[in-house]
Image (cartoon, rainbow, N blue to C red):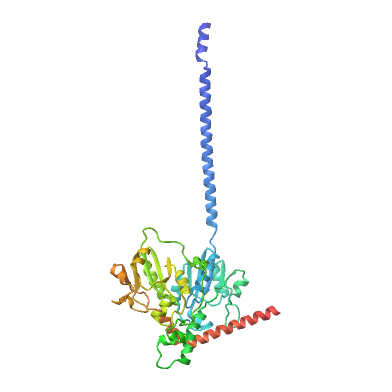
Amino acid sequence: MGGGSGGGDSDIAPHPEKIKIVATCLVVSVGISLLGFYLKSGAEWRSNWSLSLNKNKKKKKPIRVYMDGCFDMMHYGHCNALRQARALGDQLVVGVVSDAEIIANKGPPVTPLHERMIMVNAVKWVDEVISDAPYAITEEFMKRLFDEYNIDYIIHGDDPCVLPDGTDAYALAKKAGRYKQIKRTEGVSSTDIVGRMLLCTRERSISDSHNHSSLQRQFSHGNSQKFEAGGSGTGTRVSHFLPTSRRIVQFSNGKGPGADARIVYIDGAFDLFHAGHVEILRLARTLGDFLLVGIHNDQIVSAKRGAHRPIMNLHERSLSVLACRYVDEVIIGAPWEISKDMITTFNFSSVVHGTVAENDDFQKEQDNPYAVPISMGIFKVLDSPLDITTTTIIRRIVSNHEAYQKRNQKKAESEKRYYEDKTFVAGD
């Protein structure tokens, strides 16, 4: 029995190799379990951390800045101000002053509110527009900006915005500590542009006879005798503003067309860039993926539209067009006639022209600048949404030139009072 018992004990005793195998399996099993737990915990931790970061990101509200203005006869100086304002925040809200407020504080606007709204909405740096904004920032309106529109800062240029009584229109915003200032674009203003045209009108009233009463004659007497004799003088008191390459880059989109992009081309003078221009550009942009705008040089514009044109020089006109959100790129100094080589080089899919224009060259049978694109079947005439041309704007000023002269004088007097008060305070 004892031997049998001993044999039985020997049979059930664990073999050393089996023990090692079992132990190894247990270690591996526990290790895998621990690894799984670690990975799961790590994943959960990373997920929670990521959610926390996203939550923090969501909590960070965008900085909203506000800038207002009349934006009458909107030009590249206005656009540059809006560009600078946008750079001070994440979202730019723009207030457009009502016609009534402009009349009360400055004099009659050249362009009515609905046209000015079109212009401001078309600027590529603008995110939101408020219509009928007050000329001066009142307590009530400032509270509305902060509470309703979530505005963080109110922006204005370093030039004075003076009320008829000589006080600062942004005094309350400055007092609230919510005011930021940008640099004014030198060399241009709506007052200056009106002045360029009124200068021609004034010179005409002195030297022109009653036989030369057409609009063109009214604006052609700012030129020299050399020009009238067929020389190369300048037809109007055109600005000699010359942009740097940096300014052009600031206004440019910096992107070319894609490989298969449908490129739409439209050309013109785009002088005194206005709502009619904006609307035809908006319409043209819908026909393709990339809108290229050709801007004729000063010599071409003068030759085709009279010695009084252009009011704005090539560089000024180019910047105004570049600031438009519907425009992808411009050709500065585009040729009058569109050649096959030009169409091939830029890969135009269509060439367009509006029905409302300063001239009807696109309808001519001979000497038609669009003859090549017409023959290629890529020319299209678009119904212009607005019946406004550069001549329309000039007529508004000529017909009411006395009011605009008073407006310019009124602004000068207000600014003079403002600076006199500043001098007094500084001396005090």
Q: Position of residue 360 (x, y in %)?
A: 33, 78
Q: Residue at point 52% right, 39% down?
A: 39
Relative vertical location of residue 335 with respect to residue 397 in this rendering, above or below: above
Q: In screen coordinates, is 180 left or right of 293?
A: right
Quadrant (top left/top right/bottom left/bottom right) for the C terminus: bottom right
Kindly give the residue lying farthest to the bottom in the view shown. Answer: 210
Could you tell me how many numbered marks the image carries?
Answer: 0
The answer to which quarter of the image holds residue 419 is bottom right
Q: Residue at point 39% right, 59% down?
A: 258
Most foreground residue, 248 or 45 = 248
Most foreground residue, 83 or 213 = 213
Q: Position of residue 220 (x, y in %)?
A: 44, 85
The answer to which quarter of the image holds residue 155 is bottom right
Relative vertical location of residue 237 with respect to residue 127 in this rendering, above or below: below
Residue 286 in sight: no
Q: Position of residue 152 (x, y in %)?
A: 56, 66
Q: Position of residue 141 (x, y in %)?
A: 54, 73
Q: Residue at point 53% right, 41% down?
A: 41
Q: In screen coordinates, is 240 left or right of 348?
A: right
Residue 259 in sight: yes
Q: In screen coordinates, is 374 left or right of 417?
A: left
Q: In screen coordinates, is 138 left or right of 132?
A: right
Most foreground residue, 110 or 360 = 360
